[in-house]
Amino acid sequence: MALDWTPDLPKEFEERRGYSILPYLPFIGLENMFPPCDVPGYRLSDKTISDMINWDYLETLTQCYCEYHLAGLEMAAEKYEKNIRYQIAYNKPFEVERCGLYVALPENEALGRAAIDEQKNMAAAAHLGRKERYSFECAAEFGHSYGQDYEDVFWGIKRSLMAGMNAQVLHGASYSGMQLKGAEWPGYEGFGKYVSNNWNRTLSIPHARACMDTIARLNAIFRQTAKVDCAILRSRYAETGLTDDFSGYPDGGCLTNHGYSYEFVTEALLELPVCKVEDGILDREGVAYQCLIIMPTDKVSLGCLRKLQKLMEQNLPVVWIGEKPQYASFYSQWRTEEQQNIWSECLEAIWNDARLLHAQDYQQVPEILAEIGVLGNVVLDGSMDLLTASRETAEKNRYYVLYGYNRVKVTQDMPNPDEISVSAMYCQGTTKGSYRRPGCVSRRKIPVRFRGIGTVSICDPWNGTSYPLDFQSDGKGYLTGTIEMEEDEMLIFQVTGQDNKKEKSAVGQEQEAKAEISFDTLELISFEPNSEEDTSFLRSGFAADSRLIRLNRLLPWLELEKELIGFSGKGIYHGKIVLAEKKAGIYVLELGEVSDTFTVVINGKTAPFPDQVMKRGDVTDLLQKGENDLQIEVVSNLYNHLFSEKSCCMERIPIPYRPRKYGIWESTYKKVALRFFSI
């Protein structure tokens, strides 16, 4: 892949940088791009100067791209009362963080590149630029066509929300209108069966709608004003995204596990008018950074040094990790001895300023912040892998979100069997690139502190309900309590400035439910075309007849009978809950392992839509003492039916058939159970 060039670029470069790029063209080139760049990019034996020239070139490209291309598009759209949603700087050697400022709706994408730090690229631009939305083209996976379940979709969405996004576009929806010549059921597929793109072909419209409602509730929370603890200064111009979770700030999760949230700023973002310091807070009425962290670097620009000097004079805590930089980022600031002296004097003044906080390594940063009294909006003890997010409403109430992320790691020589085609395409594997819940082995109780006063309530985005919790003020501006979490679980808390406990009793400790749960039969109903001639998904539905299976134990459908390995449709489980005593409190039904989507009916009444990731739901209002009729409807997707024993292949990327489990079953750590919490 070549780098960008236009006839006017030499002129633009010289006007902006003060020297001609033409004698230095052999130095231009990058390695960290996808697809790889085939421009040589020669380096001098001392590559300092050639690197500086390369950065001058990339800075010029970024400026021209933003000013001429992005700003021009947005201006043209506004002329017609529209705006631009754009996956800006996609695979381009530009400063992505800055580019997000220039369109109304910046958009990111994962596509097998799920590292959380890379999804934060434009979060600061969205927040400092006062943009309503930061969008995400989400959930695409190679080799999971028709097989990617909603649990996996929510895995991607939750990570994106914690990275600052608050809008989604599901990656692909195949045309299902008129029956196209040569198409086989369920219809035309824009990407064949290579990518999980067929989100308009899920079998249950009510289940899909309820999942979309959940995403909408999450977005409504994350579209409130973001409050982020730490701004991390980053300077770069290209990245493939094929990296580990903490690739942008490589501390291994130390900062986040202590409760601090962070996002990436650049010199250009820090020059925005909103970047003023009040009472030691940067952009107090907006994102409200409590500190600025500078990662280890051997180069820094003169403009950045001068901005840091101003921020420290305004009493913003600045933490610099590692050794002192050795040279300027740009050759345009280093060409003469006078320029070098100016840069060195500015650096020395900052480096020796008593207000600058020096950290030897990344792990020391949380300690330094705690020592100077800079605590996160959420305070954790560092014992569990957790991400935090804070949002403030117009009424100054706060939402706090905790997410038990599972780490995505790049493994060069060990393909992930759940993403074999991604490994083949990118020539590297990812561990847990597609999420598979590990079970209660990760579940633990942890202490937590939320900034604020009043009542702490836990909110359920799956059905819109909330309950107050037993949190106490520590007298220092925080509310303290204990929560229970496991991997891939997201918990949402609301802190209101008033005591609501009198209206609804706070949820207390878990007690024995004294209940027995059993399932007797499973009714299976297949999903199929209306007739043999129909090839469109739109002319399909659940069959009129069903098949009844008597249950001795809960197993995935394909393990109940061999003939069910290619079955797709829905299963209705019939059983009962015998409750010895109905006490005042909250009853939660946990269903072990379930795939794909499910609903719960007790005594003929449908329970609030249950959590499709943690496989549980609130059934308090439906239970009665004694015997309760229980009915669970589980709906699969089409994968096993469409693929069966076939293998889907395209050149260089084999996608082997791996049967998916559907239905309800129990595993070592995930059992069917009724849990009770007192109030």
Image (cartoon, grey):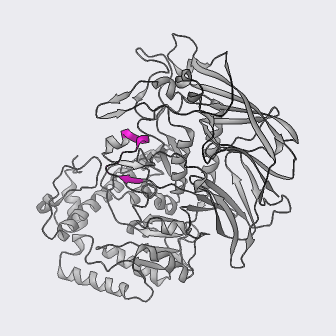
Residue 468, compared with residue 282, is above or below; it is above
Q: In percent of the image, x 61 and y 48: which residue is there?
A: 669
- Image position, residue 506 (x, y; %): 80, 61
Q: In percent of the image, x 76 and y 39: which residue is there?
A: 517
- Whether residue 419 is in magenta: the answer is yes
Of residue 320 and residue 286, the one placed in the foreground of this image is: 320
Left or right: 277 with respect to 34? right
Q: In percent of the image, x 37 and y 84: which residue is there?
A: 350
Res 490 → quadrant: bottom right
- Whether residue 174 is in magenta: the answer is no
Residue 327, compared with residue 388, is above or below; it is below
Q: What count of labels does the image hold?
A: 0
Of residue 343 and residue 519, the one placed in the foreground of this image is: 519
Of residue 117 and residue 90, the one placed in the foreground of this image is: 117
Left or right: 174 with respect to 589? left
Residue 273 shows in this picture? no
- Image position, residue 287 (x, y; %): 55, 66
Left or right: 672 with respect to 269? right
Give the magenta range: 409-421
**Residue projecting furthest to the front:** 552
- Image position, residue 260 (x, y; %): 54, 68
Residue 559 shows in this picture? yes
Res 458 → quadrant: bottom right
Q: In percent of the image, x 60 and y 55: which residue is there?
A: 486
Left or right: 519 with respect to 530? right
Quarter in which the C terminus is drawn: bottom right
Res 643 → quadrant: top left
